Image (cartoon, rainbow, N blue to C red):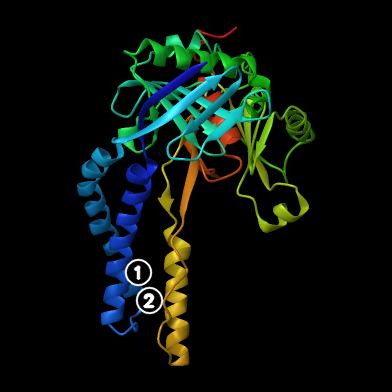
Amino acid sequence: MHHLKIPYTSGWYTVVLPTLICLGVWGGLYLGILALLGWNVPGWLGVLLCFGGFIPGLAVAVVTYPFLIRLAERGRGELILEGDRLRWRTGRRWHEVDFTQPHKARIAAGTSGLSRSNARITLYPSVQEIHLPGARREDVLAFFPEAYFVDEMAVLPEEGTWGFVLSVDDPEAVHFFQDLLECLWRHREGNESFRLYRKFPWDHHPRPAFRHIRIIDWQTATPEEQAFVESLNAQVASSLGDVQLTPDYLLAWLYPSLRSKLDGRPDGWCIMPLGHIRVEVSLPRPDWKPFIVGHILKGALASALGAATPAGGPYLKDRRYLYVRGQGEDGRPLELAFEWYGPEDREYDEADFLVRFVQTRGRPRPRGRN
């Protein structure tokens, strides 16, 4: 049995409070100015005020972040690993996970945003993290030898995450982390994330019939092209929205229309050969179009009715996109973009593994796999 009393970095200081500070300054400036103007402003001015308030909000959050980090690092917690059961607490209440039962855990080992090495185990649904700063990736793979499953970037607590922080100079802490990795390996088939990971043919080397991105218009497709698409649909390992993955290709509906969504037949297919494309997931980006159009329409409606513009929505939402870059049929560079998933989405784990699968095709097989 391992029983550790170690430092704990609280997410309240590294994530929640910085976010609240940013949103508080942003919302305070926006609503305060609207109140001074009597809540009666044109739609374009409301949009401008909303965008302008974000910059000082972000600046205040950045300035106060180092102070919050110092507060976050003062916490302590307890970890107990006994057999296949892990218990922990950061206050009075104990939490636990029995790895012999269905569970969910992710592992990361590599560099952080500050280019420092780190290893991290994340447990769900509590989203509790256990860090071992200074740990090398190859040492983690010695105890969990499935390199494609282990994320290559492990963000440190001071970079905006949280969790228990072990010391690589403490033999007992290192032994605890190794035993926890071994426990996760023994019960990997009960790990929900690992089962999603196993959906993908990691040992298959792609052999696409062509190297360029091929676009097939379904309305004018030849019988041979239709048969080719149907054969690929029979090989789909993962399907996420308009994007599907086979062992040799990434498939996607081409600009799906309302008709195609209703009858389940796409207007066209993008066929992207693995090993000859690059994929990248964008950072969250504000979806300005519906936000701006919504406020303009709301202001116009209020003017037409002779009433004050009501406060509130529509609200600005963030979106992520999957960018696929390769070569078109004419030999020129081609970039495609598809709406993608974020950590708040139920499909995030599978989407993350799909991106990782495409990114690793054509690269040498990493060490640490059985």
Q: Is residue 6 above or below residue 52?
A: above
Q: Which residue is mark 1?
A: 47
Q: Could you tell me which residue is drawn at 47 percent across and 76 percent down?
A: 297
Q: Nearer the viewer, residue 72 or 350?
A: 72
Which amino acid type corresponds to the residue marked 1 in the rendered image? Val
* Relative image position of residue 48 (x, y in whole percent): 30, 68
Q: Which residue is mark 2?
A: 43
Residues at discs 1 and 2 in contact (Cβ within 8 Å): yes
- Residue 137, located in which quarter of the rendered image? top left
Q: Nearer the viewer, residue 10 or 44?
A: 10
* Relative image position of residue 308 (x, y in whole percent): 40, 87
Identify the secondary structure beneath mark 2: helix
Q: Is residue 248 above or below residue 10?
A: above
Q: Is residue 7 visible?
A: yes
Q: Is residue 184 above or below residue 42?
A: above
| 139 displayed left or right of 196 | left
Crowding at mark 2 (Cα within 10 Å: few <14, some 14-19, many 20+): some
Mark pair 1, 2: CA separation: 6 Å
Q: Is residue 199 visible?
A: no
* Relative image position of residue 33 (x, y in whole percent): 26, 75
Q: Could you tell me which residue is drawn at 46 percent across and 17 percent down?
A: 177
Q: Could you tell me which residue is drawn at 33 percent across and 17 percent down?
A: 134
